[in-house]
Amino acid sequence: MQRLNKKYLLILLLGVIWILIYNNLTEVSEFIIYKLFGLEEGTHFTESILFFIYEVPKVLLLLVIIVFIVGIIRSWFSPEKTRKVLEGKPLLAGNTMAATLGIVTPFCSCSAIPLFLGFVEAGIPIGVTFSFLIAAPMINEVALVLLVSLFGWKVAAIYVSTGLLIAILAGFILEKLKLQKYVADWVFNMQAQHNQAVESKPTFNQRVDAGLTSVKEIVGKIWLYIFLGIAVGAAAHGYVPDDYMSQLLGKGNWYAIPLAILTGIPLYSNAVGIIPVISVLIEKGVSLGTALAFMMSVIGLSLPEIIILKKVLKWQLIALFVGVVATGIVIVGIVFNYLIFI
């Protein structure tokens, strides 16, 4: 009991320190740049360094608190529970539930592939599994943290809601097309192996430990991507002319959204690496819809994910999957470029 009290007191103390640092980031960043480093105000180099010094701790601070909270929430979930929840659900309800579970379950696109196999083996409709497969890497707490920190809650809500909509509708359409014949034959030949073990209910202390473990594992794995992504964004912030990107990918160019999607598919990045770059693209004049389309294509239609999917899907289904998701992304880009003003 004494050890537990010490742990909770330490968490409380860290929370107070978190608040103090976060509320004074601007002053601390400017002190480091102008007083400690003595850099000249207004130069390209200074603006880049200031962007980096301010954004890195801000993103890391937000990431730690959100990952901790989501880690506790995830203690109620497991791959087997996720599969059981989806079994026997009506199609559209199953798509919606699968896409929603993709947000809160700890699966990237690579780890979602084995779960995809488990879904198919359990008899869950193909379209429902695709809704999960699309939502899992595209919408997660890391993306939410970065979007909120760089753009605010409004843009973050837009991204989450549109990502969910794409996952739900794409899965629904793919199921209606009756494409089971394009799943690799060996997938259906495998016997489902359900885990019959009785899962114990974690205590509150174990759930808190799960949150702390999530912080250690997730932040430990992605901090380098955060540094690299923000470094690229900082360089663009300081050195890319304001009118260059707006001329290439501005709202007035009809080809801006398709070009953004085609450019994004061959790239390999997660939300951590790409969102800081998106922030600078918007700052330089790229419209919100085009920027979101680029981001969604990088995360949701990356070439490595397509290559992995080839192990379980035939090319016809992969092509339809890419086409349906890309069409959804194009529509989202058009809607937010021309119909929604923020």
Image (cartoon, rainbow, N blue to C red):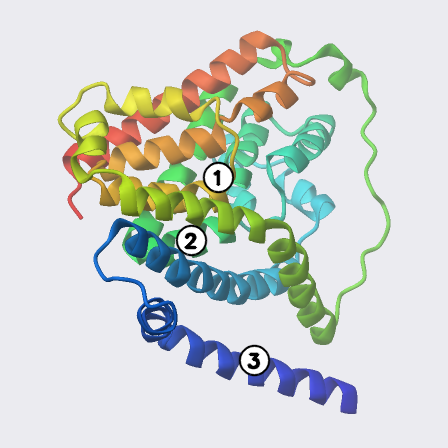
What residue is shown at x 43% (from left), y 49% (from top)? 230
Picture quadrant of residue 119: top right
Residue 140 visible in the displayed image: no
Q: Residues within 10 Å of mark 2 (few under 14, many from 20)?
A: many
What residue is shown at x 50% (from left), y 50% (from top)? 226
The amino acid type, in three-letter code, at marker 3 is Leu
Residue 250 visible in the displayed image: yes
Indicate the position of residue 169 as horizontal and vertical percent values: 41, 29
Identify the disc placed on residue 146.
2
C-alpha gap between disc 1 and disc 2: 13 Å
Picture quadrant of residue 194: top right
Indicate the position of residue 240 as horizontal and vertical percent values: 26, 38
Question: Which residue is more in the foreground, 245 or 282?
Answer: 245
Indicate the position of residue 268 as horizontal and vertical percent values: 52, 30
| Above/below status of 245 relative to 209 | above
C-alpha gap between disc 3 and disc 2: 21 Å
**Label 3 close to label 1 by CB (< 8 Å):** no
List the residue tagged with mark 1.
138
List the residue tagged with mark 3.
14
The amino acid type, in three-letter code, at marker 1 is Met
Question: Which residue is more in the foreground, 43 or 30?
Answer: 43
Secondary-structure class at tag 2: helix
The amino acid type, in three-letter code, at marker 2 is Leu
